Image (spheres, helix red, strand yellow):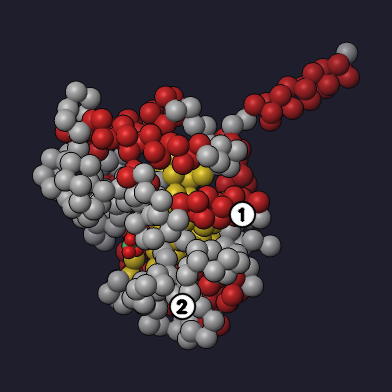
């Protein structure tokens, strides 16, 4: 009898594993990795670096530390236009290939999206008054939004077996995007996020997406309710993030902001039982040779973060430098920092 019960339990466990969706599997994996430390993430890592572009097998992180970052971010902007290349000139076919490679080497993928303004046809950074309500059903822009989402869905469906962390409509608490504070109310924003989620999950049947919500830093001393002002709800979100940069090269202000924001993030994450991550960060242009170990590491080390994603080393814009490269003055420091982070072994 006991043996029968054990084998029934075993079969149930096997069945449960067999039916777990890629999304569920990734959430489990992220929870287990979080217990081991914080993963290093880098945007567009294998596509281009500070001094090179499109060369296969290269990565500024790999070349300075000997390992690929455990998390890689990729950007979907212009997929909504059915373009062959992203807004940063990345061929989507190549991106798909790198997503698969990252998955096969045991890494994790996260997707950001800066879609053009569907009403004006200008870029994501074209916030005009009332940009979201015209996207609702029966309104003038609804069909364009649906077309945008169809194209995102088609791309994500092209690697159905690979789970990804999708982070749509990010930095909504700023006023620079057409889904930000200048262009919609919190209610309208929530509708946009919820519609995106339900359309991709229930209509397009994509079960390989882990959903991320990531406001930006508004001001230091942010409160839980301010963080949650645009929150679409627990049913729609798996991971809570925040984007915090040091653009002004003010290490003290960055440290202060990180503490107040990550306190909020950790608390809200605990209350809502969600994973948390620093979904974008970096010190633009890297002017300090010890920034990684002396500023970033002390700011993150005591928080249960899943990952920290450093932004892109733009080959065509030397100002957008966020990780070290061979020969840069931060090389030794970045190497030491990465030893503390989870990398690909
Ligand atoms: C922004 C900048 C832009 C880029 C965009 C999408 O934060 O890095 O240069 O086009 O992300 O990757």
Instruction: Report the Cα–Cα distance between label 1 and label 2.
Output: 22 Å
Compared across the picture, whether 115 is left or right of 208 comes to left
Is residue 276 shown to the viewer in this render? Answer: no
Q: SS for tag 1?
A: helix
Rendered location of residue 31, percent (x, y): 58, 45
Q: Does 305 sit above or below residue 323?
A: above
Number of marks in picture? 2
Q: Which residue occupies 42% across, 31% down?
A: 200
Q: Which residue occupies 79% across, 25% down?
A: 10
Q: Which residue occupies 23% across, 25% down?
A: 137
The residue at which mark 2 appears reads as 51
Query: Looking at the image, is mark 1 or mark 2 earlier in the sequence?
Result: 2
Query: Which quarter of the rendered image does ligand 1 occupy?
Result: bottom left
10 Å neighbourhood of mark 1: few (<14), some, or many (≥20)? few
Rendered location of residue 24, percent (x, y): 57, 35
Compared across the picture, whether 25 is left or right of 280 comes to right
Compared across the picture, whether 38 is left or right of 285 comes to right
Q: Nearer the viewer, residue 337 or 209?
A: 209
Rendered location of residue 342, percent (x, y): 60, 61
Q: SS for tag 2?
A: loop
10 Å neighbourhood of mark 2: few (<14), some, or many (≥20)? few
- Quarter of the rendering occupied by the C terminus: bottom right
- The yes-or-no answer for disc 2 within 8 Å of ligand 1 is no
Q: Does 228 sit above or below residue 306?
A: above
The residue at which mark 1 appears reads as 101
Residue found at the very far front of the displayed protein: 84
Q: Residue 66 sits in which quadrant?
A: bottom right
- Quarter of the rendering occupied by the N terminus: top right
């Amino acid at each position: 009898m006991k043996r029968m019960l054990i084998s029934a339990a075993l079969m149930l466990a096997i069945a449960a594993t067999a039916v777990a969706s890629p999304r569920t599997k990734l959430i489990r994996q992220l929870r287990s990795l979080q217990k081991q430390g914080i993963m290093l993430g880098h945007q567009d890592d294998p596509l281009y670096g500070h001094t090179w572009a499109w060369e296969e097998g290269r990565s500024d992180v790999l070349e300075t530390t000997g390992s690929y970052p455990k998390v890689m971010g990729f950007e979907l902007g212009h997929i909504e236009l059915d373009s062959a290349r992203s807004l940063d000139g990345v061929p989507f076919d190549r991106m798909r290939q790198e997503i698969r490679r990252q998955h096969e080497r045991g890494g994790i993928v996260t997707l950001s999206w800066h879609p053009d303004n569907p009403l004006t046809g200008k870029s994501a950074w074209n916030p005009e008054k009332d940009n979201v309500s015209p996207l609702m059903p029966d309104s003038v822009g609804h069909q364009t939004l649906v077309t945008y989402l169809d194209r995102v869905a088609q791309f994500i469906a092209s690697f159905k077996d690979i789970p990804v962390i999708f982070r749509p409509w990010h930095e909504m608490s700023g006023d620079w995007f057409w889904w930000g504070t200048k262009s919609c109310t919190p209610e309208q924003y929530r509708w946009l996020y919820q519609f995106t989620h339900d359309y991709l999950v229930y209509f397009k049947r994509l079960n390989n997406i882990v959903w991320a919500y990531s406001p930006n830093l508004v001001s230091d001393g942010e409160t839980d309710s301010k963080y949650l002002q645009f929150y679409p709800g627990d049913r729609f979100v798996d991971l809570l993030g925040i984007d915090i940069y040091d653009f002004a090269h003010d290490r003290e202000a960055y440290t202060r902001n990180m503490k107040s924001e990550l306190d909020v993030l950790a608390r809200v994450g605990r209350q809502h039982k969600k994973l948390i991550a620093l979904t974008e960060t970096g010190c633009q242009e890297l002017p300090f040779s010890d920034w990684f170990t002396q500023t970033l590491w002390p700011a993150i080390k005591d928080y249960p973060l899943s990952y920290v994603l450093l932004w892109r080393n733009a080959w065509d814009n030397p100002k957008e430098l966020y990780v070290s490269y061979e020969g840069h003055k931060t090389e030794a420091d970045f190497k030491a920092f990465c030893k503390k982070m989870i990398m690909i072994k």
